């Protein structure tokens, strides 16, 4: 069973808000703050190689030459679990949604029960062969564990690595060119993985396994390393330092999150980390999903996240999963054989992604997301505003027509035209959609009011603004945590500096679990306190207004109450034009 940790889900609000620390890298996210309606310019995305079409040849020289090749469209596949006993009839559902690739596994320990002898004729293998015969391709996960080798721990001896590589070669023989890639390990930044003998350098041992696999497979299929729960750039950098990038054709990540916004920042951080290590390889988002009963929200997030992944250069993505399961009853494209809204969004995105790599239109407002696919397809969402579309079709994420369109946080899919005009928004800044943009600066404030700016920081899991010296303080897209105690606080600060004079209404919502004694919240404008209170559950800000001169700041400050711990909370703060303020929904 695949493990996952979803960021800021409803379950976390209820019971897991406390004490979580998430990670990432210092990068510059520069979006021009231009006129709301101006000439459209295209922002180019970085180009990396997709190994999906043809496996890269072995050897550093061949892989380096491929690194500059143009990007093909991102492949959007789906997770199946034939290896866990799904019936072969389930394959028809994957074909119904036109999934070009299936992610599954054929565990080594189940296939090789006597040294050197492989059973690849199981029902699961037969179902995957049937997928190949129908024109689909395979991404297989393989954990290097077999009780026949190295005491059943992760293989680390030369003999164990050779045996694992031989098994993967047998998989390549079995499936031939249908095998698009092998993901070595699964969510290896989590607990219960990389289990080696005491004293083993885990990063070096894992990279040694990858090296053995590359030596045996010889470029017959893409070798994927990393396989992180969330993006986990900080964890991946330890593998880069051990030489992983020279042994793989791609990096596998599982970018689970409740909202797409900020995904571009994290992808940029990961690419920057690879560049700093000397080689950039494609990113495969081999699991993504949203665990919610709200099918409309899940369909919207599928559309937005697939769009941002494609724009960020991801070679492939796999929705988790094809059908609802006992332990994950909300995440499928189907409930049994009944299509869900997510299925309709998945099928529509197959058509959209086929138009080519999207580029984000530079419209001068970081709260407006508009991505152009090909010549006449645009995916749009963002802060509320009017939109005028001449000709073409406007649909929602599920493909349903939208007769009277307006921009909102629900995506629109516009096809057959580029004659699109946007009105201006009454939203000036937003801690969610504007996260990581020049709308906000992030800082830590100590007891003596000494304030230090926070970089984007890489840790074990998701990116956040913070610093290793100020843990557990963090600022994520929809959640945060201060640190310390009332006597020695580490306060998290969101700071919006007015580029011109601004007259504002302020709205916000905050929520935390029962752990801890509360979080002190303060909103200031121009250095004067507008409101303060203690967050112990869910809280909606009262109506607030502020007048800022150019260069003055509005701040949200979150600090511990008295005791340390249990201070993780969810938040959203929106700055509106005066007179346009409204209640803000708490993020999930």
Image (cartoon, helix red, strand yellow):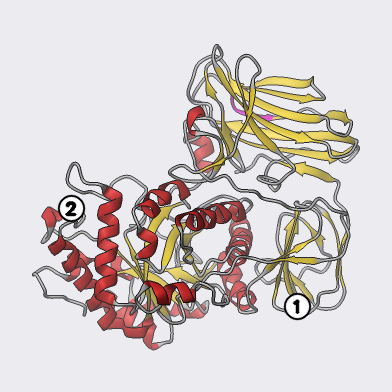
Q: Residue at x 36, y 47 (%)?
A: 190
Residue 516, percent from left and from top? 50, 22
Name the secondary structure under disc 1. loop
Camera-side residue: 353 or 325? 353
| Residue 544 among magenta residues | no
Q: Residue at x 48, y 33 (%)?
A: 468
Q: Residue furthest left?
A: 114
Q: Mark 1: few, some, or many residues within 10 Å (few <14, many ≥20)?
A: some
Q: Residue at x 49, y 19 (%)?
A: 564
What stretch of residues is rendered in magenta? Answer: 535-539
Camera-side residue: 304 or 457? 457
Q: Residue 153, labelled with which disc? A: 2
Q: Mark 2: few, some, or many residues within 10 Å (few <14, many ≥20)?
A: some
Q: Which residue is mark 1?
A: 376
Q: Of helix, strand and loop, which mostly describes the magenta segment?
A: strand
Is 213 placed left or right of 227 in the picture? left
Is 575 placed left or right of 274 in the picture? right
């Amino acid at each position: 069973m695949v493990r996952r940790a979803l960021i800021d889900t409803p379950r976390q609000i209820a019971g897991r808000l406390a004490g979580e620390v998430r990670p990432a890298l210092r990068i510059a996210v520069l979006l021009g703050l231009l006129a709301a309606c101006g000439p459209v310019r295209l922002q180019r995305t970085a180009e990396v190689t997709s190994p999906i079409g043809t496996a890269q040849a072995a050897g550093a020289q061949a892989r380096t030459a491929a690194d500059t090749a143009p990007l093909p469209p991102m492949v959007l596949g789906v997770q199946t679990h034939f290896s866990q006993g799904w019936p072969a009839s389930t394959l028809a559902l994957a074909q119904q949604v036109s999934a070009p690739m299936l992610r599954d596994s054929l565990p080594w320990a189940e296939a090789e029960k006597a040294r050197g002898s492989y059973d690849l004729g199981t029902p699961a293998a037969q179902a995957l062969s049937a997928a190949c015969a129908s024109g689909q391709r395979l991404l297989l996960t393989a954990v290097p564990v077999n009780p026949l080798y190295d005491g059943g721990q992760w293989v680390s001896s030369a003999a164990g690595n050779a045996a694992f590589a031989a098994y993967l070669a047998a998989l390549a023989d079995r499936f031939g060119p249908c095998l698009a890639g092998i993901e070595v390990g699964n969510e290896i930044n989590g607990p219960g993985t990389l289990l080696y003998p005491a004293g083993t350098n885990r990063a070096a041992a894992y990279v040694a396994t990858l090296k053995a696999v590359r030596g045996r497979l010889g470029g017959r299929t893409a070798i994927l390393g990393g396989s992180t729960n969330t993006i986990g750039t900080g964890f991946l950098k330890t593998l880069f330092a051990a030489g992983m990038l020279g042994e793989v054709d791609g990096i596998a990540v599982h970018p689970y999150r409740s909202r797409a916004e900020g995904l571009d920042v994290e992808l940029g951080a990961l690419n920057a980390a690879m560049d700093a290590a000397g080689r950039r390889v494609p990113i495969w988002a081999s699991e993504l999903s949203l665990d919610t009963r709200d099918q409309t929200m899940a369909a919207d997030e599928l559309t937005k996240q697939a769009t941002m992944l494609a724009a960020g250069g991801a070679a492939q993505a796999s929705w988790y999963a094809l059908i609802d399961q006992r332990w994950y009853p909300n995440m499928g494209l189907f409930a049994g054989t009944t299509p869900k809204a997510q299925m309709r969004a998945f099928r529509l995105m197959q058509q959209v992604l086929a138009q080519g790599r999207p580029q984000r239109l530079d419209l001068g407002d970081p709260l407006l997301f508009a991505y152009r696919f090909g010549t006449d397809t645009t995916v749009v969402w963002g802060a509320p505003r009017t939109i005028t579309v001449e000709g073409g079709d406007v649909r929602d994420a599920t493909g349903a027509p939208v007769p009277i369109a307006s921009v909102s946080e629900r995506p629109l899919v516009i096809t057959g035209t580029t004659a699109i005009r946007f009105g201006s928004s009454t939203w000036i800044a937003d801690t969610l959609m504007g996260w990581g943009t020049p709308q906000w600066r992030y800082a830590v404030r100590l007891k003596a009011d000494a304030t230090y700016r926070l970089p984007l920081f890489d840790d074990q899991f998701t990116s956040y603004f913070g610093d290793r010296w100020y843990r557990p303080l963090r600022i994520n897209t929809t959640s945060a945590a201060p640190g310390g105690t009332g006597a020695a606080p580490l306060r998290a600060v969101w700071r919006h500096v007015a580029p011109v004079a601004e007259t504002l209404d302020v709205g916000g919502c905050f929520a935390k679990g029962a752990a801890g004694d509360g979080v002190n919240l303060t909103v200031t404008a121009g250095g004067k306190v507008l409101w303060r209170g203690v967050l112990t559950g869910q809280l909606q800000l009262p109506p607030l207004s502020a007048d800022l001169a150019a260069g003055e700041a509005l701040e949200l400050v979150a600090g511990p109450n008295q005791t340390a711990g249990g201070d993780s909370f969810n938040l959203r703060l929106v700055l509106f034009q005066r007179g346009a303020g409204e209640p803000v929904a708490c993020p999930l």
